[in-house]
Image (cartoon, rainbow, N blue to C red):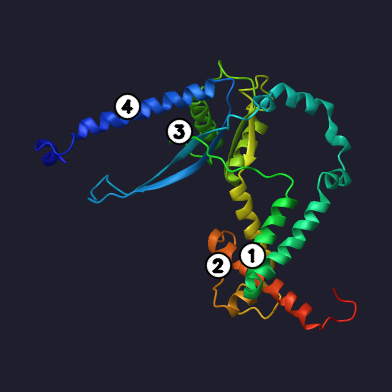
Amino acid sequence: MAYNYRISTMPSYSKIYRSLEGLSTEEALVTLNHGRDPTKAGILLFDNVQNLARIRDLRIGRENHMNVGMSGLWVEASDSTDVAVFDLNDKQRFIANSQRADLTVDTLLGFLDQEEANATGYLEWMEVLVRCTKPLNHYMAEVSARYRATAKLVIPLQKFVVHPLAASGKKQTIPSEFKDGLLDFLAQVGQLPADYILRKLIIGGDGLSYAMVLQLQAYLQFHKDPFKSFEILEPQLQVWHTKWTDLIRIFQTHWGRVSGKSTNPASLGHSAGKIGRAAPSNMKKVEFYPGSQLVHLVLDARMLDCWRFIASGNRQEGGH
């Protein structure tokens, strides 16, 4: 780099460093102004990070060590978002009404559109048959059209602006340090203990991040100030982690015997063995993409087997 700088083929190291530092400062200011704007909203996402600092020249006092901290992102909500839905006073009013006392299972089931759920289930079976049967492939357009016609709430594809936040050296697993890390992230989006916008702020991450926020809110619940009690935070478990947790549940429930070959033909492990797939090395942390592909592949095979049974006309008496 020094040689290229001397022959004028690239800028100097100090110049590059100052340029990057200036861009970082400008981005931090943009993020701060967006977070302070009462007419706009955003979502704070964060997670713990680890980085192994490997020392190439080992000497006394120089050892490999793990850098542990927290990193965060500020995601701008779309311009069509109604900021009134983040009103903290509105949430407190609903909690005071205590409508949850009248909540029943029938009420929850009433929120579901059973007609749409049944129609989607029928289309799932048709989609597998049409997609996996070559003479029927030309019906895929019709199946897709019926999916779109059945859907009641379609979320349009849209692009979100994401701002990286400065990382924190605090450990997420220690509540006191986790609180300091959250305060650091909140300060970067313009929310300070003595100067903040009184509204809910959606915050989320993986399962540990979500649980730690709930734990902090339980510890600080007796503070009267909404910021000091973290009442302004609305923790949400991110969808990607929910899907991963559900995938792990499926494997743990339906895999069958973990050691040795599974002899139960209804188990997921038996089907995986037939196609040469090995069992996950850790059932508590299944790899998402290979595991998801295996589950969907076995599901397609089982559904096609049901179609084969129906087409053959060999229904048992009283069967469906």
Residue 299 visible from this viewpoint: no
Name the amino acid, label 1: Phe
Amino acid of disc 3: Leu
Q: Is residue 156 left or right of residue 153?
A: left
Q: Nearer the viewer, residue 212 or 250?
A: 250
Residues under labels 3 and 2: Cα distance? 35 Å
Sequence-wise, the earlier of marks 2 and 4 is 4
Give the secondary structure at mark 2: loop
- Cα distance in 3D space between marks 3 and 4: 15 Å
Which of label 3 and label 4 is nearer to you? 4
Q: Nearer the viewer, residue 129 or 227?
A: 129
In this figure, which residue is indicated by the disc labeled 3?
165
- The mark found on residue 280 in the picture is 2
State the image coordinates of residue 166 (x, y, percent, origin top left): 42, 32
* Marker count (numbered): 4
Residue at the spot of label 1: 251
Residue at 74%, 75% (x, y): give it: 307
Task: Say which label, 3 or 2, has the lower sequence index.
Answer: 3
Left or right of residue 81, residue 45 in this image: left
Question: Residue pushed farthest top?
Answer: 194
Answer few, some or many: residues within 10 Å of disc 3's Cα (few below 14, many 20 plus, some between 14 and 19).
Answer: many
Which residue in the protein does label 4 denote? 22
Q: Could you tell whether 205 is left or right of 62 in the image?
A: right
x and y percentages locating residue 253 in the rendered image: 69, 65
Indicate the position of residue 99 as horizontal and vertical percent values.
85, 32
CB within 8 Å, label 3 to label 2? no
> Of helix, strand and loop, which one carries label 3?
loop
Q: CA distance from mark 1 to mark 3?
A: 36 Å
Q: Visible in this render: residue 162?
A: yes
